[in-house]
Image (cartoon, rainbow, N blue to C red):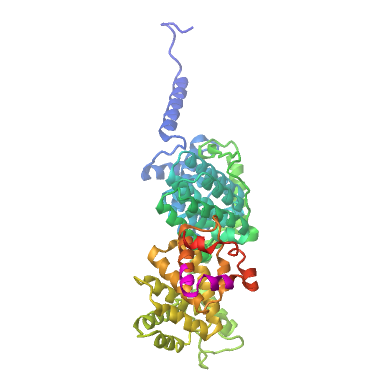
Amino acid sequence: DKGPDAPPPPPAAKKAAGSFADEAAAQKAGGRTGGVYIPPFKLAAMQKEMAKMDKASKEFQRLKWEQLRKQVNGLINKMNVGNLKLLVPDLFEINLVRGRGLLARAIMKAQLASPGFTHIYAALVAVLNTKLPENGELIVKRVIVGFRRAYKRRDKTLATAFAKFIGHLCNHQIAHELLALQLLTVLLDEPTDDSVEIAVSFTKEVGQLLEQLSPKGLHAIFERFRGILHEGTIDKRVQYTIEGLFAVRKSGFTDFPSVPEELDLVDRNDQITFEFGLDDQLDKQEMLDVFKVDPEYETNERMWKSIRAEILGESDDGSSSGSESDDEGSDGSDESEDEDEDGAGAASWGGPSGVTGGIEKGVTDQIEDLTEQDLINLRRTIYLTIMSSAGFEECAHKLAKLDIPEGHEMELCNMLIECCSQERTYLRYYGLLGQRFCLMDRRWCVTFDKAFEDQYAMIHRLETNKLRNVAKFFAHLLQTDGLPWTCLEYIHLNEEETTSSSRIFIKILAQELSEFLGIAKIKQRFLDPYMAQVCDQLLDVNWSWFINR
């Protein structure tokens, strides 16, 4: 019983109570992760005292935790495409088993701050995942949970960043491609302007991968995009982004490679893939971010040193041998490169096999132009020839003399159609020019047939005036038999596969044909047995009703 006359507590008890209060205050000031700023001079003095401390003590482990956190943050913030390969060994020098929570948090924080560097952080996670799968698994779980939380809160910025990270994790096959399809299904299930925008950007990131691994799934996603476009319930700006996505798909996602060549650091057979879904119950293991005293600290540190040696391929002397080899300078590497070049001969620098001393013998490398400058020059020449000629016969003669190489016929067809569409009114000059080329060689018939298919597929992108000119151009080719009528097989007259633009195109095409040929001759063409097999979609159509629509 403590009364007013009770003796004061002994000094030891006061000290214990004071230290407990100090620790509680320090923990409160440091937050959940104990991140307290320590001035450099004080940190240096504390590091000197660390050597004298007991490694099982709380103070020693807290200082080591702070050092680990700063090392992780420093290395992650320095990552870029150029130094990624150099910084990965430095990252393995620190204890990534104890600090996997800190690592996951630092990577996600850096990615959210700089979404443009997502491909770099995903490549880093791919390398870490092959050696320490627990780290990759933790990051995948946290990214999925982060996306779910941002999507429920309708936070477009965070959801876009997390979706981009998930896309790149799928590209490196850290996460399964089914996760990407599931995410797109969720975004497009109840489309809004924001969800469709996120889905479009996400599809660009993973499109090339899905085209290889799940083409049917990608086709279903694009059919859903097409349905949203036809519904017309979303904003015009978002509709244009969907149209741009279809153009990206047509180009084979060349501008959005799944894994850039300089970041393809891991063999696909060595990668470990986690099959998590958006609806799975995932544990973020947030307690890994919080400092806790490890009663077996020294044992775990020794285990990490053995793991690190196995990952980095170090021997007993480990890093010392590596540092000595680094200190040898560039002389040794230059000598070894010279020896390799002498031994390998011309094959080492890409010369013909079996040829040595190619430079002395006058053998030169053939330089291949990848800038497509020849193609640009060809397009410029075609355009100038079309616009500067006095008549279609002169123009056809000049273009025929260009000797357009095989495989580039479509450049002339596209340029001719583009010039025709740009005119204020349709000019027969372009139709006569296209007719002359179709009658000149069969390869031009095939090319214009392909051009008709492409133009009809993208007809919704054209303005009304351009659409009218293009329709009259192809009507001229059909009525003069320059273009085979079998090209009409690309037209499917039904409500699902036509748009308002395509119906206007078909109407103008039919009107032009009826004015030149007449209804009787058109009917005779379509009752031909061969045409009945090719254009079965058009046989049941009442053309008089269709023209009057």
Which residue is located at x 44 percent, y 76 percent? 371
On the rendered structure, is 29 left or right of 522?
left
Visible residue check, residue 96: no
Visible residue check, residue 485: yes
On the rendered structure, is 532 left or right of 252?
right
Looking at the image, how many numbered discs can be counted on the residues? Answer: 0
Which residue is located at x 41 percent, y 81 percent? 382
Q: As drawn, which residue projects farthest toward the front? A: 520
User: Looking at the picture, does residue 12 appear above or below residue 324?
Assistant: above
Expressed as whole percent of the image width and height from the top left, the position of residue 81 reads 46, 61
Q: Who is closer to the viewer here, 525 or 431?
A: 525
Q: Who is closer to the viewer here, 337 or 1?
A: 337
Q: What segment carries the magenta color?
A: 511-525
Which residue is located at x 57 percent, y 89 percent? 356
Q: Quadrant of residue 130?
A: bottom right
Magenta segment's dominant SS is: helix
Q: Is residue 517 magenta?
A: yes
Q: Quadrant of residue 472?
A: bottom left
Q: Who is closer to the viewer here, 19 or 25?
A: 25
User: Looking at the picture, does residue 97 appear above or below residue 507?
Assistant: above
Q: Who is closer to the viewer here, 93 or 252?
A: 252
Expressed as whole percent of the image width and height from the top left, the position of residue 220 reads 59, 54
Expressed as whole percent of the image width and height from the top left, the position of residue 201 reads 47, 54
Expressed as whole percent of the image width and height from the top left, the position of residue 195 reads 47, 47
Q: Is residue 503 magenta?
A: no
Q: As drawn, which residue projects farthest toward the bottom? A: 361
